[in-house]
Image (tube, rainbow, N blue to C red):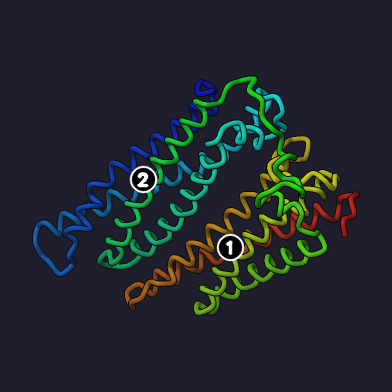
Amino acid sequence: MLLRPGALALLAISLVGALLLASALPHALRILRRWNPADPGEGQVALERGTWLFPPLVALAVSLQVLGLPILVQDADRAAELLPGAMCAVGTFRAGPLGFPALLAHLGLVLLGLAWLALHRVDVGTPGGPLARVLAAGLLGLAPLQGVVLGLQAAFYAGLEPGGLTSCCQALFDPGAAGLPGELAAWSPRLALPVAGTALALAAISAFAGLRAERLRPLAALAGLGASAAGAAALVSVLGPYVYELPGHHCPFCLLRPEHGRVGWLLHPALLAGAAASLAQLALVPLRGGDLAPAKAAVGRCLAWTAGIAFLLFLLVSLVLIGRSRLILL
């Protein structure tokens, strides 16, 4: 299935991202070896000029990966039509051993890349580029991960054969199945709904509270990461059955399909945005220094708004979906 348009588009995005990050690596290595703001020599001046070159390359690469994530999921959903036994993207990802690793690696790259961009914004807003070494070291982690993502995606698509037998999502997200998906599906709605609702509400409230009290932002970031996990669990245990109006159907990927109103394209990006903003907020916590304070505060406010709105949107959409469903689980 390498020659399908969706697969080619996704691999092109990952390849361009890998080339962009690879082209920025030499300068990042020079920064790690030679960066010395106290040195007035020509070498340091050249490095400082170069710091305006590699961050845009990384920013473009990360932006492409954000675009590529929904392409990967949507293409997997469409490819399910060619695989007997598949109902949605889950069947496609399960058709090969590298399906879910490719998805999870891409998701990790997006989250870490967005955290890198938050640090970059603080660095840009602070005179002297105090985070140059931190950003260069971060690039040394992002570039290999981008290569892993490209390799996993290429191998995954190369191993997919039209007509190959696979299993449907219900076999994975079954309350009796072994593994984390089965455990989440078995989570009692009487417990899942109040836990997830409370976690999401607290995450939104703490994010908005952090707009006025900067000292609360680390706690808000931790609350946001907890709410992201609780929201993802609720997607499987509660929201899926309510939307499908089938107590035994727990797949979160089917929420993206047209027969269910594509509501997943509201829920999943909102949860991802909240998780990314919370993780980026947490990445700002170790930053110290008076010069960094104004830029850190400005970026932190932007992240707080993003997290608060994202978690609130996820919570409100979830409540609407549950309220209009004819299924009663509680």
Circle 1: element type: helix
State the residue at coordinates (38%, 72%): 287
**Which residue is located at x 49 percent, y 53 percent?**
111
Q: Of the two numbered discs 2 and 1 on the same chain, state the one appearing first in sequence.
A: 2
Q: Is residue 180 visible?
A: yes
Q: Position of residue 155 (x, y in %)?
A: 47, 31
Which class describes the residues within 10 Å of circle 2: few (<14), some (14-19), or many (20+)?
A: some
- Give the mark count: 2
Q: Is residue 283 above or below residue 250?
A: below
Measured in 3D between alpha carbons, the distance from the residue under mark 2 to the one under mark 1, in whole angstroms, is: 28 Å
Viewed as shown, does residue 247 lie left or right of 72? right
Q: Amino acid at mark 1?
A: Ala
Q: Where does label 2 land, which residue?
A: 144
Residue 235 visible in the shown view? no
Q: Quadrant of the C terminus?
A: bottom right
From the image, tell me which residue sits under label 1.
307
Q: Amino acid at mark 2?
A: Pro
For the N terminus, the quadrant is: top right
What residue lies at 30% left-to-right and 42% top-to-bottom?
22
Q: Residues within 10 Å of mark 1 (few under 14, many from 20)?
A: many
Determine the residue positioned at 33% across, 37% down. 19
Q: Residue furthest left?
A: 41
Foreground disc of the pair 2, 1? 2
Residue 302 position, x and y percent, is 51, 64
